[in-house]
Structure formats: structure tokens, C-alpha cells
Image (tube, helix red, strand yellow):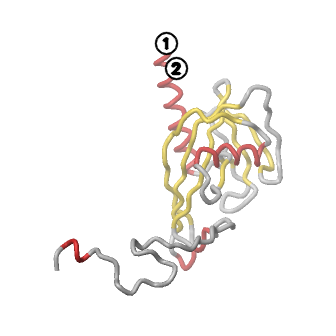
């Protein structure tokens, strides 16, 4: 059999599927947020909102960091661009409109999962600044918030948040040095 013959479609193509393998029938789009316990990997988008050398943190309402200081963020909706999800989450949690300046990086976190299998979170972090005239407010998701000095963050602070703050501090130092 030649390589070309090995990739030909099967002569018995199921109804609703084209010879190229693409479905002719529209597939349903998932409308619910995936339950992180159903998979081993989850995507999370966060924003490092900065103003006058300070960074905005929220006191987390939900597990696994209930009561701890974290960055505003959450899970993207299906098909939602990650930077847009980061902006939306800040608006939902703090009623604050922000402008995304640039990506900071991808950070990884392992948290307890089902059956003692760790759940892996990939955290996409973005540097953002408040839009003029916008001020944060506490919500059901963010029971408290504070503008903090990133060099002296409050405790308790989860390890991924600390790593993201260090990266943000380095990025803003580099940017200031380039503009001098």
C-alpha cells in the first residue's frame, strides 16, 4: 500500500460525515463551565492590575484558597479569548474596567484532585491597568480587595500568586528602565 492509499477515506463513510472526515452535522457547543474535577487540566486567566506601583488583590471566597489573597481571575468561557476572559473576570469580581497591557506568562499549579490525582491548573497571567475613572468594589466573588505593595504582599498568599507578582514586578522594572 502506498502512503497516498493509507490516508484515503474508508469506503463505508458513516451518514453525516464527509469523505474528508469533517462532520456535515453541526456539533453542539458546551454551554456549561467544565467541572475541573472531570479533567486533569484546567485553564485559569488572571490579571495583575497595577496602579502607582501597587497591585490589586482580592480575598478569595471559594476553595481552594478561601480567605486568602489572590489575583482577580477565573475560567474562560468556551471559545472566549484568554485576554478577554481576564478582563471579564476583573469586571465580574470588582466591577472594574481594565485594559490589558500585555501577557506576563503561563504559570502552573498542582492542586488536590479526584482519587488523589493532582489537578493541574495552567494560569495565563496578564498585566493590566484600570481604565480612567474606574474604581474597584467588593462583590460576592471578591469579599474584600486591597491595593498592595508587591514587594511586601499580605499573608496568606498562594505560591502561584507570589510567582506571578514577582514576574509582574520584573516586567514593570524592565519597562521603566527602557523608557528612561
Q: Mark 2 = which residue?
A: 176
Work out how far the residue at label 1 is from the one at label 2, CA to CA, in angstroms: 7 Å
The image shows residue 144, relative to residue 75, as above or below, that is above
What residue appears at the point 82 percent right and 44 percent down from the top-left corner? 138
Q: Are marks 1 and 2 in contact (CB under 8 Å)?
A: yes
Q: Nearer the viewer, residue 29 or 18?
A: 18
Give residue 180's mark: 1
Point out the image quarter for the N terminus: bottom left
What residue appears at the point 74 percent right and 49 percent down from the top-left corner? 59
The image shows residue 80, relative to residue 15, as above or below, that is above
Q: Is residue 62 left or right of residue 19?
A: right
Q: Which residue extends farthest bottom?
A: 12
Q: Position of residue 148 (x, y in %)?
A: 68, 34
The image shows residue 140, relative to residue 135, as above or below, that is below
Q: Secondary structure at mark 1?
A: loop
Q: Which residue extends farthest left?
A: 2
Q: Is residue 122 left or right of residue 11?
A: right
Q: Which residue extends farthest top?
A: 180
What residue appears at the point 47 percent right and 18 percent down from the top-left corner? 177
Q: Position of residue 66 (x, y in %)?
A: 72, 58
The image shows residue 162, relative to residue 14, as above or below, that is above
Q: Nearer the viewer, residue 129 or 25?
A: 25
Label 1 Cα neighbours within 10 Å, binned few <14 / some 14-19 / many ≥20: few
Amino acid at each position: 500500500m502506498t502512503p497516498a492509499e493509507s490516508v484515503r477515506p474508508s469506503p463505508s463513510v458513516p451518514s453525516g460525515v464527509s469523505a474528508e472526515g469533517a462532520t456535515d452535522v453541526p456539533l453542539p457547543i458546551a454551554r456549561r463551565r467544565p467541572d475541573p474535577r472531570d479533567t486533569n487540566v484546567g485553564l485559569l486567566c488572571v490579571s495583575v492590575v497595577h496602579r502607582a506601583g501597587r497591585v490589586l488583590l482580592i480575598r478569595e471566597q471559594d476553595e481552594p484558597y478561601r480567605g486568602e489573597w489572590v489575583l482577580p481571575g477565573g475560567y474562560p468561557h468556551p471559545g472566549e479569548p484568554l485576554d478577554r476572559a481576564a478582563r471579564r473576570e476583573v469586571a465580574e469580581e470588582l466591577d472594574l474596567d481594565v485594559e490589558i497591557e500585555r501577557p506576563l506568562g503561563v504559570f502552573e499549579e498542582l492542586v488536590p484532585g479526584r482519587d488523589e490525582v493532582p489537578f493541574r491548573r495552567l494560569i495565563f497571567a496578564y498585566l493590566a491597568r484600570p481604565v480612567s475613572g474606574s474604581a474597584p468594589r467588593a462583590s460576592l466573588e471578591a469579599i474584600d480587595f486591597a491595593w498592595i505593595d508587591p514587594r511586601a504582599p499580605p499573608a496568606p498568599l498562594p505560591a502561584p500568586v507570589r510567582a506571578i507578582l514577582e514576574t509582574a514586578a520584573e516586567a514593570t522594572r524592565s519597562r521603566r528602565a527602557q523608557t528612561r
